[in-house]
Amino acid sequence: MPNPCERGNEIDLLLSEGRKLTGVEIKSSSTYHSSFKERLRWFKEHVAPLQRACIVYNGEHQAFSDGIEFLPFDSAAELGLGASA
């Protein structure tokens, strides 16, 4: 298995539920940039398949045909991140 960190291709969070993996990138931007998807795509292609791939950022929810979702910060709890009530 390639080491993604050797080439700067690490992702911010890797969540697991059994054998299902969710890759998460966290960005401070409020504007979508296609480059935000690069590391998640690389991970999916070269390391392990992801059940879900998300970018948490300061913008609006967006879903793309490649399966990568952009989630606003206040939706991070949907991924099991953040404080519970």
Image: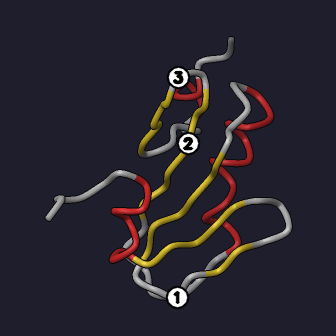
Q: Quadrant of residue 56?
A: bottom left
- Outermost right residue: 65
Which dot, 3 or 1, sits closer to the camera? 3
Q: Which dot marks residue 22?
A: 2
Q: How is the image coloured?
A: secondary structure
Q: Quadrant of residue 64?
A: bottom right
Residue 45's x, y, as percent?
A: 80, 35
Whether 45 is drawn above or below 72: the answer is: above
Question: How far separated are the C-alphas under marks 3 and 2?
Answer: 11 Å
Residue 67's x, y, as percent?
A: 77, 59
Question: How far separated are the C-alphas under marks 3 and 1?
Answer: 29 Å
Picture quarter with the C terminus: bottom left
Give the labeled residue for mark 3: 18
Dot 1 alpha-carbon crowd within 10 angstroms: few under 14, some 14 to 19, many 20 or more: some
Give the labeled residue for mark 1: 60
User: What is the secondary structure assignment of the residue under circle 1?
Assistant: loop
Q: Residue type at mark 2?
A: Thr
